[in-house]
Amino acid sequence: MTLTLHDVTLTYPDGDTSRLTALDAVTLEVAGGELAAVVGPSGSGKSSLLAVAATLVTPDSGSVVVDGTPTGTLSRAEKAELRRDRIGIVFQQPNLLASLTAAEQLQVMAHLSGRKPREVRDRARELLAAVGLADKADRRPHQLSGGQRQRINIARALMNEPAVMLVDEPTSALDHERGAAVLDLLAGLTRERGVATVLVTHDRSHLEVADRVVRMADGRLGAMSPTGV
Ligand code: ADP
Ligand code: MG
């Protein structure tokens, strides 16, 4: 279970004639069980990096290999399937469905991949327990705190046993203590389940959970390992 980005360049149109370089020859390899943190100022390309790794955005050049699958030649449908089966995505805002309970938020993910209902229910229960919310399975989002919603978001991303987790500033809506708990959880799950995880964070105090810290500046990636700062 690895994620490899090799020499990835991504530009966006910027006005009529010029282009803005969001990612500039970025190379990053994350092994299974490893949590790589990405830090850097706003606008430096962190979310673009995750969008490319998630196959949501196609780079101008370079390669993205997810769990051994080169993504460059995949069709849109094949990319969607790869995301569903191999990639767990956690963005800033939990984005839960208001009408579903915690357990149902997770189950919905797996029904899409056609697994047996019994298996799906068991896995949802196991993951809710893993994120410390076994007793909240029947709550709806409005009956949960921000931290609890973000933990459900993480559990949901793990539902289809992804090889790769891509996590963008998951603690930005949380206070420091709850943010730290969410990141501890993420680091623990990464190691236990052998997932290759990329965590974007602006909060340097959270970096101790990472195995490696890399810094983005103007679309370029530079090493900062092993402890950051
Ligand atoms: P970060 O997550 O580090 O704040 P982003 O990856 O969101 O950075 O953005 C990197 C650069 O690319 C910024 O200059 C941003 O304005 C630009 N950018 C991001 N998304 C788009 C887009 N869809 N179209 C045009 N420019 C974009
Ligand atoms: Mg961003």
Image: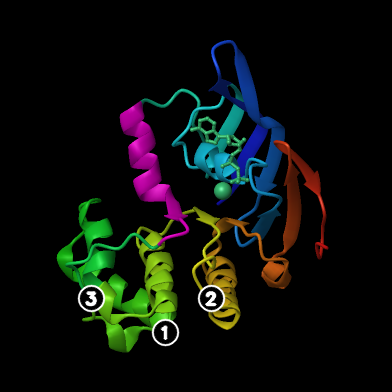
| Few, some or many residues within 10 Å of mark 1 (<14, 14–19, 20+) | some
Mark 2 highlights which residue?
Answer: 185
Judge by depth and name the residue closer to the eye, 167 or 128: 167
Left or right side of 168 for 35? right
Q: Which mark is residue 140?
A: 3
Vertical position of residue 146 compared to residue 46: above or below: below
Percent position of residue 24, x then y: 70, 30
Which region shows up in magenta? Answer: 76-93
Q: Quadrant of residue 195?
A: bottom right
Q: The residue under label 2 is which amino acid type?
A: Leu
Q: Quadrant of residue 119?
A: bottom left
Q: Mark 1 CB in 8 Å range of ligand 2?
A: no
Q: The residue under label 1 is which amino acid type?
A: Gly
Percent position of residue 97, x then y: 24, 62
Examine the structure image and report whether residue 90 is included in the region drawn in magenta: yes
Judge by depth and name the residue closer to the eye, 21 or 59: 21
Judge by depth and name the residue closer to the eye, 179 or 108: 179
The residue most toward the top is 17
Examine the structure image and report whether residue 149 is included in the region drawn in magenta: no
Q: Residue at x 55, y 59 (%)?
A: 169
Mark 1 residue element:
loop
Q: Residue at x 37, y 71 (%)?
A: 152
Q: Which mark is residue 184?
A: none
Q: Quadrant of ligand 1?
A: top right
| Few, some or many residues within 10 Å of mark 2 (<14, 14–19, 20+) | some
Vertical position of residue 66 compared to residue 125: above or below: above
Mark 1 highlights which residue?
Answer: 132
Percent position of residue 36, x then y: 67, 57
